[in-house]
């Protein structure tokens, strides 16, 4: 059994891919920040005509002209509309057509799994967003790898009697570490780092938004272990069915389920005897059940485990691990990254 | 001695003429290679939706030669942080890549295409490719016409200039 490393990513190397798309002046100012601050950096928010905002783990701040952090918006470095357009060009690699589908959903993913949210004037066609013109805001969410993040929940995700992985759903509001946790779960299953003596499992990662594996040109940048197959940029529902039919996985891992077709694919997988580890946006299990299509999954006992996360003690705080009926197996709150 | 000198002058002038004539003949071939690159780039972009830098690199690697090297240079420039693609691409000279067979202006249909598809959605990719293709085909036709006249002219002009110089010197 090969264990996963617990080394954390170097904050500067994590930022490299993000800095590559920022205009020179802004990138240089950010490079001047200390390693500690870079490590705390969760989001970089660029708004046309507004100061550059950095969302740190504990508090937001503006980046001042002298490279210091300030709470005063008047002292912050202003981002011009031209700079924003330049960033967008670099984000899309001068190829709007290549990220058209993502942009319709309001984001672009950078190499390394950093998701960039887009706001501006939406161009709507037949009631659906077709594109964005006059982009006025970009939100760069820094993606970090935390090997070991799933260590405390792994014992709940594997049935040692039947020796099979359990379908699990990770539930939390945004920015609580769902993707980081699901990535580590995938890695641990793949390496066989979940139950002493048990071999690793075949893991199919359906990475619609390229955030779990952070693939560049289809090659995962995050370590997902030796038994992971990644369907990068593939729609979740279609990808799950493709993986089940052709990759014979023990576990299918995916991010942010919420649509009817996702629910159907999860049900299909559970009927096919394949464990699904997925994430969903919701403050609690009850809130998740109230979302359209999700109650059906709950009633069908599609998931054996629910892991509820929060930021109470920082991102990745495990609030509770619940069973298929929503009964607590463990109450937590003390563990965070 | 005089005779040897005259033969040398005649030979040198003929060689210069032949070289210039060869340049005229090479131009349509080089432009056809650009057209081939454009066709392959179109399938990379339209069918695979590959982003421009990766598409240029893939086609360049496949094609090889000066054309492949030129495409890979462009891909490298676009992959580096820079002010804008226009400024970045100015540093990739087609004239240097082809040792003067083509001019930098010959790259204009290609560069115009890159600028257009940079902001196009998938439904509107075909038009810029068709326009670039038409421009290149017109350039190939013009280069072929020039080659017929220019190559023959320089072939004779070189030798005739040699004879003329020899006669003057004698």
Image (cartoon, coloured by chain):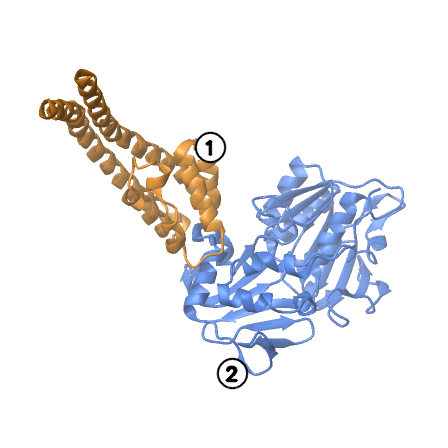
Apparent colour of chain B:
orange
| Residue B119 seen from this side | no
Residue A68 figure quarter: bottom right
User: Could you tell me if the residues under marks 2 and 1 are in contact, i.e. CB atoms within 8 Å?
Assistant: no
Q: Which mark is residue A261?
A: none
Q: Residue at x 42, y 45 (%)?
A: B74
Q: Residue at x 65, y 35 (%)?
A: A246
Apparent colour of chain A:
blue
Q: Which mark is residue A74?
A: 2
A207 relative position to A318: left or right:
left
User: Of residues B67 and A273, which is closer to you in this image?
Assistant: B67
Q: Residue at x 36, y 49 (%)?
A: B124
Q: Which mark is residue B62?
A: 1
| Residue A170 seen from this side | yes
Q: Residue at x 69, y 58 (%)?
A: A10
Q: Position of residue A221 (x, y in %)?
A: 64, 48
A291, above or below B101, in the image: below
Q: Position of residue A199 (x, y in %)?
A: 83, 40
Residue B99 figure quarter: top left
Q: CA distance from mark 2 to mark 1?
A: 53 Å
A183, above or below A290, in the image: above
Q: Position of residue A332 (x, y in %)?
A: 83, 67
Q: Residues within 10 Å of mark 1 (few under 14, many from 20)?
A: few
Label 2 secondary element: helix
């Amino acid at each position: 059994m090969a264990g996963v490393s617990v080394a954390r990513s170097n904050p500067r190397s994590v930022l490299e891919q993000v800095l590559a798309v920022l205009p020179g002046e802004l990138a240089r100012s950010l490079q001047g920040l200390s390693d500690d601050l870079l490590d705390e950096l969760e989001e970089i928010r660029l708004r046309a005509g507004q100061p550059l905002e950095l969302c740190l783990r504990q508090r937001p701040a503006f980046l001042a002209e002298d490279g210091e952090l300030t709470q005063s918006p008047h002292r912050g470095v202003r981002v011009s509309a031209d700079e924003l357009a330049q960033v967008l060009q670099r984000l899309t690699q001068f190829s709007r057509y290549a990220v058209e589908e993502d942009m319709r959903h309001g984001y672009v993913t950078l190499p390394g799994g950093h998701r960039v949210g887009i706001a501006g004037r939406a161009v709507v066609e037949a009631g659906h967003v077709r594109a964005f013109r006059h982009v006025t805001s970009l939100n760069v969410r820094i993606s970090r790898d935390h090997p070991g993040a799933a260590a405390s929940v792994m014992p709940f995700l594997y049935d040692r009697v039947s020796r099979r992985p359990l379908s699990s759903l990770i539930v939390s509001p945004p920015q609580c570490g769902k993707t980081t946790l699901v990535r580590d779960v995938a890695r641990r299953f793949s390496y066989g780092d979940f139950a002493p003596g048990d071999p690793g499992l075949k893991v199919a990662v359906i990475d619609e938004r390229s955030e779990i594996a952070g693939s560049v040109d289809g090659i995962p940048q995050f370590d997902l272990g030796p038994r992971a197959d990644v369907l990068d940029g593939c729609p979740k529902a279609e990808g799950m069915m493709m993986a089940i039919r052709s990759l014979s996985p023990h576990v299918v891992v995916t991010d942010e389920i919420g649509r009817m077709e996702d629910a159907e694919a999860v049900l299909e997988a559970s009927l096919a005897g394949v464990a699904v580890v997925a994430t969903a946006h919701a403050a609690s299990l009850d809130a998740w059940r109230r979302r359209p299509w999700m109650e059906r999954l709950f009633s069908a006992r599609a998931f054996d485990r629910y892991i509820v996360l929060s930021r109470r003690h920082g991102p990745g705080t495990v609030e509770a691990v619940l069973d298929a009926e929503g009964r607590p197996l463990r109450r937590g709150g003390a563990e965070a990254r | 001695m005089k005779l040897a000198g005259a033969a040398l002058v005649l030979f040198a002038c003929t060689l210069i003429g032949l070289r210039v004539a060869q340049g005229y003949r090479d131009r349509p071939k080089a432009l056809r290679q650009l057209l081939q690159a454009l066709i392959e780039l179109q399938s990379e972009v339209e069918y695979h939706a590959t982003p421009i830098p990766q598409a240029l690199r893939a086609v360049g690697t496949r094609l090889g030669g000066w054309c492949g090297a030129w495409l890979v240079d462009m891909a490298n420039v676009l992959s580096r942080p820079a002010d804008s693609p226009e400024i970045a691409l100015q540093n990739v000279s087609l004239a240097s890549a082809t040792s003067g067979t083509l001019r930098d202006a010959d790259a204009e249909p290609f560069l115009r295409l890159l600028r257009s598809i940079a902001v196009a959605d998938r439904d509107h990719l075909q038009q810029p490719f068709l326009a670039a293709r038409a421009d290149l085909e017109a350039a190939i036709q013009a280069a072929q016409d020039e080659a017929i006249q220019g190559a023959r002219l320089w072939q004779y002009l070189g030798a005739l200039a040699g004879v003329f110089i020899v006669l003057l010197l004698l």
